[in-house]
Image (spheres, coloured by chain):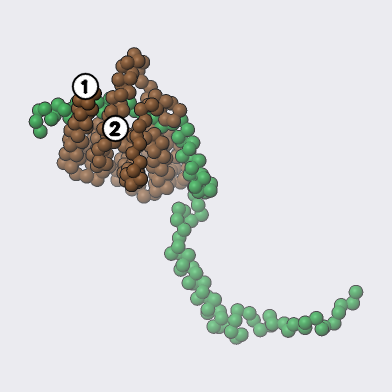
């Protein structure tokens, strides 16, 4: 942990609002991206991301600095996502049709895409939706590892710390998740053809 | 793992890593801090007198000690209460002398 991070933590423990804003600025997009990919719905993702930061700020004193701050932050994020997935499953709320909002900057924006021809852009948006739907169809255990590893590009070691799972379990879940995604995508391409 | 499986997994990994990064709304930071302010009625930021938690244990001990002190004072008092005897002034119920105007 860097001296800068330690100083930020000290200020957070002193309930410094400016430190909290610095924390938000530094991590909000990554946390939001994880919640969005885990939940597949912008409103839910924003709500959960907000809860993550509120939890972090409320429980910052319980962070023992045994791991990186980001590891702890992502653990809180994953736990909130899991809870929300369970809650939504109970309510049978599985509406993840967000394709029409992917380029809308008003309520959360996708990172600026490179200019592309309309047909290629449409193709990209379709692929985006396909992948998001496929991720959403995985069970939460597989969804977590695939989002952290393949979408967020975190190391296996860090995923083990975040999920508190052994190395072998993470790798096998990741492998199964990728194969399941591949099957779902193939099925969809087969239906289209 | 077969070679085919490996290729398939790699293909999926590439597709997923190509997903665009979703960015939090511009008002996100403001929304979070205002939620915190709202939920805590403005008390969330800056330290509280007793830190983050009410020290219920310490308060309970202080209350027990207080009761013991009061009990001892009552036990040691000649009147059996916390009042001393000369505190007791008889009421005259309005039948006493009127003060001269």
For disc 1, the marked residue is A193
Quarter of the image with the C terminus of chain A in it: top left
- Chain bearing mark 2: A
Label 1 secondary element: loop
Asked whether, in this view, residue A46 is left or right of residue B16, the answer is right
| Residue at figure coordinates x 24%, y 23% from the top left | A192
Cβ–Cβ under 8 Å for marks 2 and 1 = no
Q: Tell me: residue A89, above or below residue B71.
A: above
The x and y percentages for residue A168 are 16, 41
Residue A137 visible to the viewer: yes
Q: Which disc number belongs to residue B68?
A: none
| Residue at figure coordinates x 42%, y 44% from the top left | A54
Q: Are marks 2 and 1 on the same chain?
A: yes
| Residue at figure coordinates x 26%, y 32% from the top left | A134
> Which residue is outermost to the top?
A117
Asked whether, in this view, residue A17 is left or right of residue A186, the answer is right
Label 2 secondary element: helix
Quarter of the image with the N terminus of chain A in it: top left
Q: Tell me: residue A4, above or below residue A118.
A: below
Q: Nearer the viewer, residue A147 or B74?
A: A147
Residue A154 visible to the viewer: no
Shown colour of chain A: brown
Cα distance, mark 2 to mark 1? 19 Å
The x and y percentages for residue B2 are 9, 31
For disc 2, the marked residue is A133
Q: Tell me: residue A87, above or below residue A114.
A: below
Which quarter of the figure has residue A72?
top left
Q: Nearer the viewer, residue A145 or A60?
A: A145
Which quarter of the figure has residue A177?
top left
Shown colour of chain B: green
| Residue at figure coordinates x 24%, y 35% from the top left | A146
Q: Nearer the viewer, mark 2 or mark 1?
A: 1
């Amino acid at each position: 942990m860097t001296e800068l991070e330690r100083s930020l933590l000290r200020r957070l423990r002193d309930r410094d609002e400016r430190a909290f804003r610095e924390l938000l600025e530094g991590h909000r997009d990554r946390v939001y991206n994880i919640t969005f990919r885990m939940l597949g719905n912008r409103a839910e993702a924003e709500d959960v991301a907000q809860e993550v930061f509120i939890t972090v700020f409320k429980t910052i004193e319980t962070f023992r600095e045994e791991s990186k701050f980001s590891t702890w932050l992502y653990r809180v994020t994953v736990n909130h996502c899991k809870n929300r997935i369970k809650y939504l499953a109970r309510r049978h709320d599985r509406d993840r049709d967000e394709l029409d909002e992917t380029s809308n900057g008003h309520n959360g924006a996708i990172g600026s895409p490179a200019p592309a021809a309309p047909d290629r852009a449409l193709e990209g948006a379709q692929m985006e939706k396909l992948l998001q739907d496929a991720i959403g169809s995985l069970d939460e255990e597989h969804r977590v590892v695939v989002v952290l590893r393949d979408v967020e590009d975190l190391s296996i070691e860090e995923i083990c710390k975040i999920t508190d799972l052994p190395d072998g379990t993470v790798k096998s879940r990741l492998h199964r998740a990728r194969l399941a995604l591949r099957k779902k995508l193939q099925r969809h391409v087969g239906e289209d053809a | 793992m077969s070679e085919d499986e490996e290729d398939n997994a790699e293909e999926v990994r590439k597709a997923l890593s190509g997903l665009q990064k979703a960015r939090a709304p511009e008002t996100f930071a403001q929304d979070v801090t205002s939620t915190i302010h709202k939920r805590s009625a403005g008390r969330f930021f800056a330290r509280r007198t007793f830190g983050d938690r009410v020290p219920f244990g310490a308060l309970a001990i202080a209350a027990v000690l207080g009761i013991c002190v009061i009990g001892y004072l009552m036990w040691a008092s000649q009147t059996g209460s916390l009042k001393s005897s000369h505190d007791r002034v008889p009421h005259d119920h309005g039948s006493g002398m009127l003060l001269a105007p």
